Image: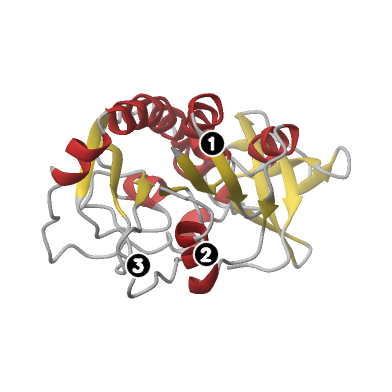
């Protein structure tokens, strides 16, 4: 099968499957500093295989050319940050989106973090037909993931990827049957927004356990303000020992951060602006 792939390192297992068993015509990807999984591995694999890599958005005209002139048989979308504007009259178009929730619950650009915010006991991964309305296409396959107090957001990303690698192989090997058997989603489910900035922001009055719980849920979306500038927290550990000042830098990107009952050990990465 000839594929155009849209995504990042989150579902690298799917890209690796297509790379081994099928033909990838192009990779469309993106970069976002707050994401734990970026596009480092997937672009490296694409470049090694001679697959064109694009960061710009795709136009409806380009979509049409892929299907009508270049023999594309499937668009596969797996953790991509842009909505595709689909051509209105392209009967041969087929597209699958991979989404990290149990749709129709969890329509969102931040489904994992939003699920953690809500304290859900389970979430999952869904593959559905691409549709004009975001995350609302007919469901082709779905797997469930249990969430325990020890599960963090990266655990869920990794479990989603493992399931997705198995799911896409089964779907492609039985493509026509699975495509026809897809089930419409229920209506009326809300779109989950990005967690509020207050839930993502460290402050000196919190406990070190509160900080660890924040990082468990949101990982590198966690933010901290230092001298009027905002940073993403890329790693966080904590302890009960006091420190003699609110912030003590150990290097350009490592510091001790005082909280009410101890300290945090932070690795940080600058962000252009607070979202």
Residue under label 2: 65
Residue under label 1: 23
Q: Position of residue 67 (x, y in %)?
A: 45, 58
Q: Residue at the location (79% across, 63% down)?
A: 227
- In the rendering, which numbered label is found on residue 90? 3
Q: Residue at the location (24% across, 57% down)?
A: 137
How far is disc 1 from disc 2 in space, using C-alphas? 17 Å
- In the rendering, which numbered label is found on residue 45? none
Report the side of 227 relative to 113 (left or right).
right
- Whether residue 195 is visible to the viewer of this picture, yes or no, is yes
**Residue neighbourhood size for the residue with mark 3, other residues' Cα within 10 Å, grouped as few (<14), some (14–19), many (≥20):** few
Numbered disc 1: secondary structure: strand
Q: Earlier in the sequence, mark 3 or mark 1?
A: 1
Numbered disc 2: secondary structure: helix
Above-or-below relation of 62 to 75: below
Question: Toward which corner of the image does residue 102 lie, by quadrant?
Answer: top left
Q: Nearer the viewer, residue 143 or 245?
A: 143
Q: Earlier in the sequence, mark 1 or mark 2?
A: 1
Direction right: furthest residue: 251
Q: Quadrant of the C terminus?
A: bottom right
Q: Quadrant of the N terminus?
A: top left
**Residue neighbourhood size for the residue with mark 1, other residues' Cα within 10 Å, grouped as few (<14), some (14–19), many (≥20):** some
Q: Residue at the location (44% across, 28% down)?
A: 155
Q: Position of residue 253 (x, y in %)?
A: 82, 43
Question: Toward which corner of the image does residue 126 lie, by quadrant?
Answer: top left
Report the side of 254 relative to 113 (left or right).
right
Colour scheme of the rendered structure: secondary structure
Q: Position of residue 149 (x, y in %)?
A: 34, 28
How far is disc 3 from disc 1 in space, using C-alphas? 21 Å
Numbered disc 3: secondary structure: loop
Q: Residue at the location (45% across, 35% down)?
A: 157
């Amino acid at each position: 099968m000839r594929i155009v792939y849209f995504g990042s390192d989150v579902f690298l297992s799917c890209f690796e499957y297509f790379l081994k068993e099928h033909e990838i015509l192009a990779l469309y990807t993106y970069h976002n500093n707050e994401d734990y999984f970026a596009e480092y591995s997937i672009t490296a694999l694409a470049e090694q295989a001679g697959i064109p890599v694009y960061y710009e958005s795709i136009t409806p005209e380009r979509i049409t050319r892929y299907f009508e002139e270049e023999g594309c048989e499937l668009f596969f979308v797996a953790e991509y940050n842009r909505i595709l504007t689909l051509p209105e009259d392209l009967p041969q178009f087929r597209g699958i989106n991979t989404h990290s929730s149990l749709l129709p619950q969890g329509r969102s650009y931040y489904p994992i973090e939003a699920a953690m915010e809500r304290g859900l006991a389970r979430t999952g991964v869904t593959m559905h037909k691409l549709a004009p309305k975001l995350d609302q296409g007919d469901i082709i396959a779905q797997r469930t993931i249990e969430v325990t107090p020890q599960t963090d957001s990266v655990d869920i990303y990794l479990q989603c990827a493992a399931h997705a690698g198995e799911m896409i192989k089964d779907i492609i090997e039985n493509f026509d049957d699975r495509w026809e058997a897809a089930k419409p989603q229920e209506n009326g489910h809300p779109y989950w927004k990005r967690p509020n900035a207050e839930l993502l922001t460290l402050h000196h009055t919190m406990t070190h356990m509160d900080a660890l719980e924040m990082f468990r849920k949101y990982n590198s979306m966690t933010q901290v303000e230092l001298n009027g500038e905002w940073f993403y927290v890329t790693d966080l550990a904590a302890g009960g020992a006091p420190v003699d000042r609110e912030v003590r830098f150990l290097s350009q990107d490592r510091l001790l951060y005082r909280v009410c009952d101890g300290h945090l050990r932070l690795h940080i990465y600058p962000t252009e602006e607070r979202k």
